[in-house]
């Protein structure tokens, strides 16, 4: 670890707007629930793009066939979309940006007894609904970081082009389902959002609002990716947006310099027979006191060696030359490395992804800790319940070697994104599961909001 270790700091369906008068009212009315669009949760709209041209091209390619309307009235997909737009405050967005008077007027005029007026208005309403959908979906994907650090820039959420969003919607087997489930977002998002709208408990609403912001930065239904939820101490494997496997993990302790940080990066390789380069603070905490007590034999028993520095060309150092009491007191920094062997703290394999915290996924010989209900035992890295199973999913084959050489690299053909997050509320089936705020980050965030005179959810 580098010095950055110390820098860490209800389910219901959307209302079905089935009557035209209700639709128009919903377009112009204030959102029916009091969620604050505050600096804590508000998001800036996506950057402007020539959406109208893309929308026109989309309709030209389908010979003008409507998507959201039938005979000038919103169809089931249009009704679902209007329900989302009317409740955009739940997303930290301003509903007025999408519920335009022009759309309300077009929907009304589409029912005119004058055929030409109605036909023109119906076309206008269809185009305005597409424009509202594109603006809303792009604004959602242009998400604030919500505490996530992106060490692979390609993983930062971006607003998709209008044509892409419309093509995704049109290709959906069921467009109403696509809209209700917000399938351009992470699979957890729509259900958390619905729970937020439905929940009357102000404390639960605040927790849901925090987690909705975190879910916004997670990927949609893309190719393979990994999500580690430090609050649940669990790793999930996704393929095409579907959960395909899950396992327990051990994450960082609750101390400030041991908490597993929220970050997004990409797994690019595995290392078999890994060294464990002990972070200096852990060397002081876990190793030096035992060397002071038992001498250098403790190092030999546990296959530790002392190196001259942190460079790739570091050379071994006689442990007798080290002031181990000074190391234990935090006055002397020393590089200690554990050699590969059966009891190596990283087990047989580690999975690297670039980040300045020295955090990675790894095997562990200490399986007993993975049976605990709360698994906050590491110095920040993530210990896997079944590293072999994870490696086989990641690479498509078993990771083995007959060699005893240390740090054997096994590169991936394609990097696999990994998102380390902190979801204290997340969907489980048709319900929401709440987890303890083990790192206190929810409490810290809400204290900031309340200290500023704003109570999230009011």
Image (tube, rainbow, N blue to C red):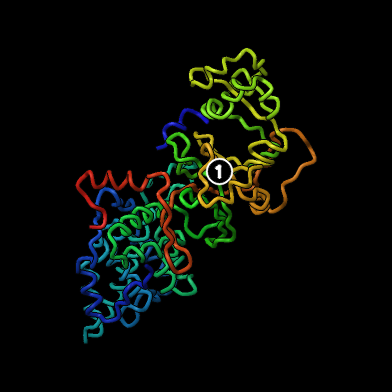
Q: Residue furthest front?
A: 293
- 50 or 419: which is nearer to us? 419
Q: Which of the 4 image quadrants contains residue 278?
A: top right
Q: Say if 172 sits above or below 276 in the image.
A: below
Q: Is residue 268 left or right of residue 227?
A: right
Residue 5's x, y, as percent?
47, 32
Residue drawn at (37%, 60%) of the image:
137
Residue situated furthest bottom in the rendering: 113
Viewer-proximal residue, 352 or 132? 352
Percent from the top left, x then y, of residue 265?
A: 51, 43
Is 262 situated above or below 193?
above
Residue 170 visible somewhere in the drawing: yes
Q: Is residue 114 left or right of residue 346?
A: left
- Which residue is located at x 55 percent, y 55 percent? 236
Nearer-the-camera pick, 197 or 304: 304
Q: Is residue 50 visible?
A: no
For residue 436, side relative to residue 450 (left or right)? right
Q: Residue at x 57, y 52 (%)?
A: 248
Residue 277 pos. (x, y %): 61, 30
Residue at screen point 49% across, 21% down: 330
The residue carrying mark 1 is 382
């Amino acid at each position: 670890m580098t010095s950055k270790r110390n820098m860490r700091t209800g389910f219901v369906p959307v209302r079905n707007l089935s009557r035209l008068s209700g639709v128009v009212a919903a377009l112009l009315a204030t959102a029916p629930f009091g969620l604050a669009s505050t600096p804590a949760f508000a998001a800036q709209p996506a950057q402007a793009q020539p959406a109208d041209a893309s929308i026109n091209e989309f309709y030209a390619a389908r010979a003008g066939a409507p998507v959201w309307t039938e005979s000038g009235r919103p169809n089931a997909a249009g009704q679902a979309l209007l329900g989302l737009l009317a409740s955009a405050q739940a997303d930290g967005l301003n509903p007025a940006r999408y519920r335009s008077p022009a759309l309300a007027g077009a929907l009304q005029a589409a029912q005119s007894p004058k055929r030409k007026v109605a036909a023109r208005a119906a076309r206008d309403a269809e185009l305005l609904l597409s424009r509202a959908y594109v603006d809303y979906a792009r604004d959602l994907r242009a998400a604030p970081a919500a505490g996530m650090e992106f060490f692979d820039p390609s993983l930062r959420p971006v607003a998709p082009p209008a044509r892409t969003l419309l093509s995704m919607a049109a290709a959906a087997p069921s467009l109403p389902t696509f809209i209700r489930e917000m399938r351009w977002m992470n699979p957890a998002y729509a259900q958390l959002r619905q729970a937020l709208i439905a929940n009357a408990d102000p404390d639960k609403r605040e927790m849901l609002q925090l987690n909705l912001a975190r879910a916004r930065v997670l990927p949609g239904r893309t190719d393979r990716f990994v999500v580690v939820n430090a609050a649940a101490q669990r790793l999930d494997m996704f393929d095409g947006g579907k959960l395909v496997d899950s396992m327990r993990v051990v994450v960082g302790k609750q101390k400030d310099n041991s908490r597993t940080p929220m970050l997004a990066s990409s797994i690019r390789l595995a290392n078999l027979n890994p060294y464990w380069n002990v972070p200096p603070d852990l060397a002081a905490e876990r190793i030096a006191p035992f060397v002071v007590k038992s001498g250098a034999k403790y190092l030999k028993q546990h296959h530790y060696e002392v190196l001259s520095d942190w460079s790739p060309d570091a050379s071994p150092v006689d442990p007798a030359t080290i002031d181990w009491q000074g190391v234990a007191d935090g006055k002397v920094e020393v590089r200690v490395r554990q050699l590969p062997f059966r009891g190596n703290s990283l087990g047989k394999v580690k999975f690297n992804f670039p980040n300045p915290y020295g955090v990675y996924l790894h095997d562990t010989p200490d399986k007993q800790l993975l049976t605990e209900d709360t698994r906050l035992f590491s110095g920040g890295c993530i210990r896997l319940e079944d590293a072999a199973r994870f490696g086989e999913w990641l690479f498509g084959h078993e990771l083995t070697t007959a060699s005893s050489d240390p740090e054997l690299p096994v590169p991936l053909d394609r990097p696999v994104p990994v998102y380390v997050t902190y979801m204290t509320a997340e969907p489980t089936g048709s319900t929401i599961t709440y987890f303890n705020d083990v790192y206190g980050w929810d409490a810290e965030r809400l204290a900031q909001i309340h200290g500023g005179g704003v109570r999230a959810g009011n």
